[in-house]
Amino acid sequence: MKKIGNYFFPNSDIHFQRWVLDGEYQKKQRDELFLKMNSIKPIKRICDIGGHVGTWSVPMAQYKNTEMIYAFEPNERVRECFIENTLPFKDKVTVYNVALGKENGKALLDIEEDNTGNTRIRVVDETNLKTIEVRTLDSFELKDIDYMKIDVEGLEYKILDKIKDIDNFDWYCIMFEFNRFDGTRNDIIEEFLDGKQVQGISAHRVELSNDTFFTYNKSIRAISDDFAKISSHHDVIVTKNVDWSHK
C-alpha cells in the first residue's frame, strides 16, 4: 500500500495521484450533495456500490447523521486498502467481498493495476482476470437505505435494473456514474429513470433544487429527448419522492 492524500491505495496505482486534491477525492460534489440531502431528511443508511479504497465511504462515515454504510468491493487488493482507510469507522462501515449485479452467480474481474478505479467485470482474454462472486442487492435484505452511490465501470445499468425490479423504497437518492454507457444499454437506463426526478451533474458542481431536476419521460424522447439532457454528464442523480425546495 501507499498513501495518496488521506488514503491508502495499492502500490501499483498511478492514476489517482492527480485527482486527489487537498487529500480528498470529489469532495466538493459530495459535501454539497450531503449538505442538501441532510437538510431534507437525515441520511442514515448508505450503500457504497463500488467502494474502491473508501474515498467516499470515509467522508460519508463522518457526516453527523450517518449510522451505517454498506460497501461492496470485489477487488481484493483494493478492498484491503478500503479496510485500512475505514478502520476509525469500523463500527459503522461494512464492506462485502462481492460485486453487485442483476443475478446471483460468478463473474470474471478484469483488474487494471495502474488505475484500480477502472477495474470491471467483463469477459476478455484471461490475463489479469479473477473469479468473483456476484450477488443482487436485495439478497442482502438491507432496510431503509437513504442514499446509494454506484460506480462500477459501465455495469451500473445491471444494478439499476435490479433496483427497478425490487423497488420497495418510499424515498431514495441514487447517484450513479454515467459516462461509459453505449447504445446497447441506454434502454435499460431509460426504463429505470422513467417517471423519476433526474439531474445530470459534473464532478465539481452540484445544484440541487426542484428547478434543476426534471421528471424523466422516456416515451417523449423523440420530441424533447430527455436522454440528451443527461448524456454529456459524468454522473446522474435520480431521486424518488424528494422535495428539493427545503432549505
Image (tube, helix red, strand yellow):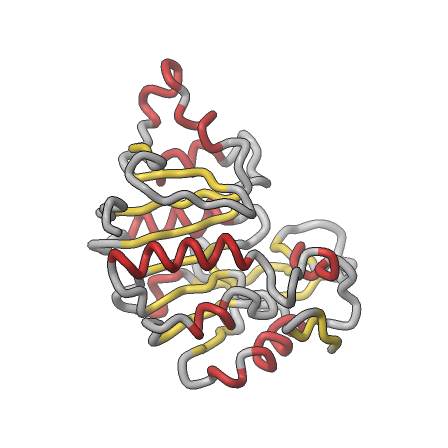
Decide: is 193 above or below 80. Answer: above
* Percent position of residue 182, x then y: 57, 33
- 95 lies left or right of 2: left
**Quadrant of the rendered structure where residue 215 is?**
top left
Q: Nearer the viewer, residue 148 or 208?
A: 208
- 75 lies left or right of 67: right
Decide: is 150 above or below 233. Answer: below
For the question of whether residue 105 can be seen, the reply is: no
**Quadrant of the rendered structure where residue 67 is?**
bottom left
For the question of whether residue 130 can be seen, the reply is: yes
Residue at coordinates 36% horizontally, 36% vertically from top-left? 212
- 156 lies left or right of 76: left
* Percent position of residue 54, x then y: 56, 69
Decide: is 132 above or below 219. Answer: below
Q: Nearer the viewer, residue 217 or 31?
A: 31
* Percent position of residue 168, x then y: 22, 55
Residue at coordinates 41% horizontally, 21% vertically from top-left? 225
